[in-house]
């Protein structure tokens, strides 16, 4: 788990990072989601929020990298994020969590030759289903890069992009 905290209480996540927070005033944020997908989990009972910045669908292409950075792959990000949230007092199997997905665009693949974004979204849904979880909301696909943040206090998920004004899911 990577927790790069800034002075204002923001937990910044890079590609393949994941983290959780529960202190009032904290925000978990990741930048520039192109084909990558942010997996967000919110526990409405404990007010724990978590996020993983998922870059690729399957860890089988690089098992060593998956050990070092499980948030990099959809199939390893889900259990890693569930554990991070459980370490802060959340339910270890995610029961009652609100799940949201953001990203998965065709930013550098306009002809959908590789469809990494779409494959990331589908792989995350498959991994979530193993725990009986599924996204309650999503903002995926399209051709815009997104930045996303979730705050501990309200559980608000705010998305920004250079190509449009901020919005929430």
Image (cartoon, helix red, strand yellow):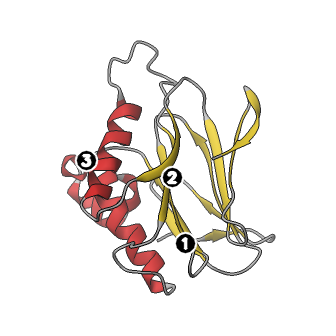
Q: Nearer the viewer, residue 96 or 25?
A: 96
Q: Position of residue 117 (x, y in %)?
A: 41, 33
Q: Position of residue 50 (x, y in %)?
A: 53, 67
SS of the residue under disc 3: loop
Query: Which residue is drawn at the image coordinates 53% and 25% (left, top)?
Result: 142
| Viewer-side label of 1, 2 | 2
Q: Quadrant of residue 165?
A: top right
Distance from label 1 to label 2 (Cα)? 14 Å
Distance from label 3 to label 1 (Cα)? 22 Å
Q: Is residue 42 left or right of residue 79?
A: right
Q: Position of residue 72 (x, y in %)?
A: 39, 53
Identify the disc placed on residue 157.
Answer: none
* Dot placed on the residue nearer the N-terminal end, 3 or 1: 1
Query: Which residue is drawn at the image coordinates 66% and 55% (left, top)?
Result: 149
| Viewer-side label of 2, 3 | 2
Q: Is residue 130 left or right of residue 54?
A: left
Identity of the residue furthest to the left in this view? 60
SS of the residue under disc 1: strand
Identify the disc placed on residue 20.
Answer: 1
Q: Quadrant of residue 81?
A: bottom left
SS of the residue under disc 2: strand
* Dot placed on the residue nearer the N-terminal end, 1 or 2: 1
Q: For the residue carrying disc 3, how many other residues have a C-alpha within 10 Å: few (<14), some (14-19), or many (20+)?
A: some
Q: Nearer the viewer, residue 131 or 150?
A: 131
Q: For the residue carrying disc 2, how many other residues have a C-alpha within 10 Å: few (<14), some (14-19), or many (20+)?
A: some
Q: Image height check: is 63 above or below 162? A: below
Q: Image height check: is 159 above or below 145? A: below
Q: Quadrant of residue 111?
A: top left
Residue topped by disc 2: 100
Q: Image height check: is 101 above or below 156? A: above
Residue topped by disc 3: 58
Q: For the residue carrying disc 1, how many other residues have a C-alpha within 10 Å: few (<14), some (14-19), or many (20+)?
A: many
């Amino acid at each position: 788990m990577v927790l790069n905290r800034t002075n204002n209480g923001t937990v910044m996540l890079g590609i393949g990072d994941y983290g959780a927070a529960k202190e009032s005033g904290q925000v978990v944020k990741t930048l520039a989601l192109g084909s990558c997908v942010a997996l967000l989990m919110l526990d409405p009972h404990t007010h724990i929020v978590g996020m993983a910045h998922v870059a690729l669908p399957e860890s089988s292409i690089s098992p060593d990298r998956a050990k070092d950075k499980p948030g990099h792959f959809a199939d390893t990000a889900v259990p890693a994020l569930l554990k991070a949230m459980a370490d802060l007092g959340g339910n270890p199997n995610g029961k009652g969590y609100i799940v949201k997905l953001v990203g998965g665009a065709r930013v550098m693949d306009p002809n959908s030759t590789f469809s990494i974004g779409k494959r990331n979204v589908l792989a995350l849904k498959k991994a979530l289903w193993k725990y009986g979880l599924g996204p309650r909301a999503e903002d995926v696909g399209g051709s815009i890069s997104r930045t996303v943040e979730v705050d501990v206090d309200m559980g608000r998920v705010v998305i920004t992009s250079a190509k449009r004004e901020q919005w929430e899911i």
